Image (tube, grey):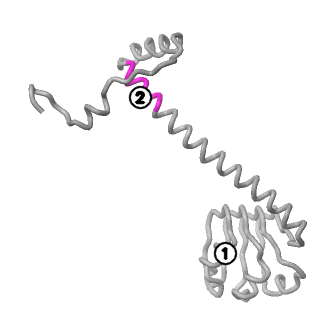
């Protein structure tokens, strides 16, 4: 870089002039006024605005994706009910024992349970054969007899998975 210039080629590239067609004149004038009040250039204000907008768009996109997953899971729960899968839902805290699972005549799906605990007498074979899915639970506590990663294949939208202590 010559002629007393400072900076780098990449920062020059980032700051090159860009023309945006179709900008509403009234919005531009308001933005120009705001940039003067803030003591920044219109370009800096537009950059700040675009960063804020893109950040918000990203958060919104994630929220929409999460909502669509919830709707999809709700639809799946309805279908599971129609297929003979029992659905246990909307319980704050539930402990499931070996006897509980053995007494079921069909697989079970757990939905919307804040704290779901499987007691130490539940092994992988019984869990795998009787638990169809676990969805939208805050915390799932598994005994050491159930491989956590295998169990996770049956889970969606779970905040925390831990192993039963003791």
Q: x, y (%) of residue 44? A: 37, 24
Q: Is residue 39 above or below residue 57?
A: above
At x 39%, y 18%, the residue is: 42
Residue sticking out furthest to the left: 3
Instruction: Name the element at disc 1.
Output: strand
Quadrant in the rendering for residue 106: bottom right
Tally of numbered discs = 2
At x 84%, y 68%, the residue is: 88
Q: Residues within 10 Å of mark 1 (few under 14, many from 20)?
A: some
Is residue 69 or residue 33 the one in the foreground? 69
Find the magenta span and give its range: 42-50
At x 80%, y 61%, the residue is: 76
Q: x, y (%) of residue 75? A: 81, 57
Instruction: Name the element at disc 2.
Output: helix
Quarter of the image where the N terminus is located: top left
Quarter of the image where the C terminus is located: bottom right
Label 2 to label 1, Cα distance in Å? 46 Å
- Mark closest to the chain's N terminus, 2 or 1: 2
At x 76%, y 52%, the residue is: 71
Is residue 153 or residue 112 the one in the foreground? 153
Q: Is residue 30 above or below residue 113?
A: above
Q: x, y (%) of residue 110? A: 78, 69
Which mark, by number, is residue 159?
A: none
Q: Which residue is mark 2?
A: 47
Q: Which residue is mark 1?
A: 141
- Whether residue 95 sits left or right of residue 34 in the image: it is right
Identify the main secondary structure in magenta: helix
Mark toward the viewer: 2 or 1: 2
- State yes or no: residue 68 in magenta: no
- Whether residue 156 sits left or right of residue 81 in the image: it is left
Q: x, y (%) of residue 97? A: 78, 83
């Amino acid at each position: 870089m010559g002629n007393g210039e400072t900076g780098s080629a990449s920062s020059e590239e980032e700051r090159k002039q860009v023309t945006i067609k179709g900008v509403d004149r009234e919005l531009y004038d308001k933005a120009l006024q705001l940039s003067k009040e803030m003591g920044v250039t219109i370009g800096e204000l537009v950059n700040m605005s675009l960063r804020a907008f893109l950040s918000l768009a990203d958060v919104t996109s994630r929220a929409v994706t999460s909502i669509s997953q919830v709707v999809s899971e709700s639809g799946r729960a309805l279908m599971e009910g129609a297929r003979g899968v029992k659905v246990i839902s909307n319980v704050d805290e539930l402990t499931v024992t070996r006897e509980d699972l053995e007494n079921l005549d069909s697989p079970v799906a757990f939905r919307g349970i804040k704290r779901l605990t499987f007691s130490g007498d539940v092994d992988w074979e019984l869990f795998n054969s009787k638990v169809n899915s676990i969805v939208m639970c805050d915390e799932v506590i598994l005994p050491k007899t159930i491989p956590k990663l295998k169990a996770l294949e049956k889970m969606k939208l779970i905040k925390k998975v831990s192993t039963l202590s003791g």
